[in-house]
Amino acid sequence: MTKNPTLDRVKALRQLMNERGISAFIIPGTDPHLSEYSADHWKSRGWISGFNGSAGTAVVTSEKAGLWTDSRYFLQAEIQLAGSDFVLFKDGLPETPSIREWLVEILPSGSVVGIDGSMFSYSEAKQLKEFFEEKGLSLVSDFTPFEQIWTERPPVPTDPIYVYPEKYSGESLENKISRILAKIKENNANAILLAALDEIAWLLNIRGTDVPCNPVGICYAYISEQERILFINAKKIDKSTAEYLQANGFKLAQYEKIYDFLSNRSESERLHIDPRKINYSLVNAIPKDRKIIFSNSPITWEKSLKNKVEIAGFKDAMLRDGVALVHFFRWLEEHVKDGNVTEITISEKLREFRSQQALYVGESFSTIAGFNAHGAIVHYSATPETNATLKPEGFLLIDSGAQYLDGTTDITRTVALGELSSKQKRDFTLVLKGHIGIATCRFPQGTRGSQIDILARRFLWNEGLNYLHGTGHGIGHFLNVHEGPQNIRLEENPTPLTPGMVTSNEPGVYIAGEYGIRTENLTLVVEDTETDFGKFYKFETLTLFPIDKKAIDKSLLTEEEIAWLNNYHQTVFEKLSPALDDASKDWLRKATDKL
C-alpha cells in the first residue's frame, strides 16, 4: 500500500514547530485575502492534510492532528483523510468540540499556539488570542513554516487582470468609489483598506484569472479622498489596464509593499477596516497610535444589490445557460445506456456545451456530478479513482454553473436515470415541496433568511429527514458564486433579504451510501406589494431549466404546488425554445409538459 504523502509533511512541520517552541499550529483553508477559494499557492491546508474541500481547518500538535469541516464534506473528508495522521471533527454537531476547546483540553498550561496571521481575519485572530491567554496558553502569529517545508509550492499567480466594461457592470468605477467614500465618511473615516478580492474587483470594475472559477486578481487596494493605490504584481498590469487605472486616479505599487505602506500612515488618517475581511498581519502593521475605525465593509452590501444592467445580464446569462443545459441533458439521456458515460465525462461535456454559448468565460465552480451513492456526498468531486460509470438506474445529482461576462449561474438538478423506488420519489418530492415553499414565499420588508428557512425544511422534518447545509447563498455578478451578506439558513444572520439580491434556493436530502437529492434555482428578491402592514417582497426565479417530472410523486403535491411547477415549466419552454433546434425543442416540450 502506498504511503500517504502527508505523513512526511506533518513530520517536517512538527520539526519546525519544535524548533520554535510551538505546541499546536492552526491551518485554515484560505489566503491573505480570506477567500473561500484560493490560488494554489495558498492551499497549504490541502497540502498538509490531503483534504481539498472549500471549507475546513487543520490543526497539528506535537502528537495529534485534526481536521474540522462542515456537513457538506463529512463523507469526502473521511475518504481523503484515510491513511493520514488527521482525525475528522464534524463541525456543527453537538458532540464536536471547537478547535479552541480541543486545544485547551489537550495542551498543558503555558503551551504556545501558532498561526500565520496573514491567513486569519483580524477579528478571528484577536478572539483566539484573548481566549487562549485567558486559558493559560499563548498565541504567536508569525509562524510561516510552509515557506520552508513546501518545496514544490506553486508560485503566486501573475496572470494579467483586465478591465470589466461598464456595459456589463452598469456603473463606473468613479461612481462606485464616490458612494463608498460617502459611506465611510458617515463612520468618520476618510480612507478604506480593501483585501477581499471580489470587493476590489467589483469596486474597480476589474477581473482576473488568479483563482479557479472566480474571476478575481490578487491585489490590495487603498482608497482615500486624496489617494488611490492598487498593490499588485507589476506583471499583472498590461498597458491598457494601466492607462485605465491611471485615468481613474490610481497609483500602482508592488503587492508586498502593502506592509511598508501601512506602517507609515499619517496621524490625520482615519482608516476604515472591516475586521472580518482584513487579515491580522495587515492590521498589526499599522502603528498602534493611528486611528482605525472597525466597521463592516460598505462594499459587501452595495455589491449585493444588483443594478438594472446586472439584473438584465443575469437573465440573459440564464437563458443561454438553459439552452446549454437542454443540449447537455438531451445528450445524457441518449447516451447513458451506452455504458461509457462517467461522472468525469459529465463535467467535460457540460463544459463543452456551455463553452458554445456567447460570453462564456468558464465554470463558476467545479461540477459536482454524483451517481447514486456519490450524490450523498454534498460537495463530491469525481477523481480517476472514484469515477463512477452511469447506468440506467437510480439518481444522478448534477450541481454546476458557469461564468458569463454578463452573469454567474449555479443550478442543481437531480434526475432519474431509470426506475425509482417509492421512497426515492417521496424524498425527491419532499425536497421539491421545500423548493416551492421558498420560491412562492411572500415576506415583509426586513425579513431575514433564517426566518423563512423552515419553509424549505418542514416537509423533510415531518418525515424525520433534514439537510445540514444552508438553503440559499448570495451570488456574485460575474464574480464569486458564493457571496454575502445575505443567506437563507437556520443560523441567524441580521442581513434582511432586499430587492436586488440574487440568492440560491437549494434544499436537499442525502441518504448516505444510497443517493442524494438537491433542487437548486437562483432567485431575485423583488418588490411585491404594499399594504397597511408595510412593504412585502417575493422571489423571482431566474434559472431556466425543467425539474425532472419522472422523479415526482404527484400525490404528495398540492394543487398550488402543481400549478407552480406547471407555470415554471411553461416559462422555461417559452423562453428557451426560440433558441433551440427542432429536436431539442421537442425534447424540452416533453420535459415541460404539464404534470
Image: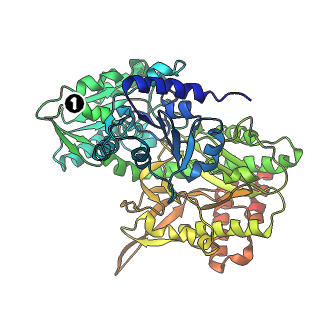
What x and y, as percent, mark residue 468? 56, 59
Of the pair 309 and 473, the residue shown nearer to us: 473
Residue that appears at 51% across and 58% down: 95
Residue 515 lies in quadrant: bottom right
Q: Quadrant of the C terminus?
A: bottom right
Amino acid at circle 1: Glu
Q: Is residue 326 visible?
A: no
Residue 119 lies in quadrant: top left
Of the pair 191 and 295, the residue shown nearer to us: 295
In the rendered image, the vertical position of residue 40 relative to residue 392, given as above or below: above
What x and y, as percent, mark residue 105? 42, 47
Residue that appears at 45% across and 57% down: 487
Of the pair 220 and 567, the residue shown nearer to us: 220
Q: Residues within 10 Å of mark 1 (few under 14, many from 20)?
A: few
- Residue extending furthest left? 268
Residue 353 lies in quadrant: top right
Residue that appears at 29% across and 32% down: 282
What x and y, as percent, mark residue 15? 47, 23
Q: Quadrant of the N terminus?
A: top right
- Residue extending furthest right? 338
- Disc tally is 1
In this rendering, position of residue 482 left or right of residue 199:
right
In the rendered image, the vertical position of residue 202 relative to residue 582, given as above or below: above
What x and y, as percent, mark residue 362? 59, 36
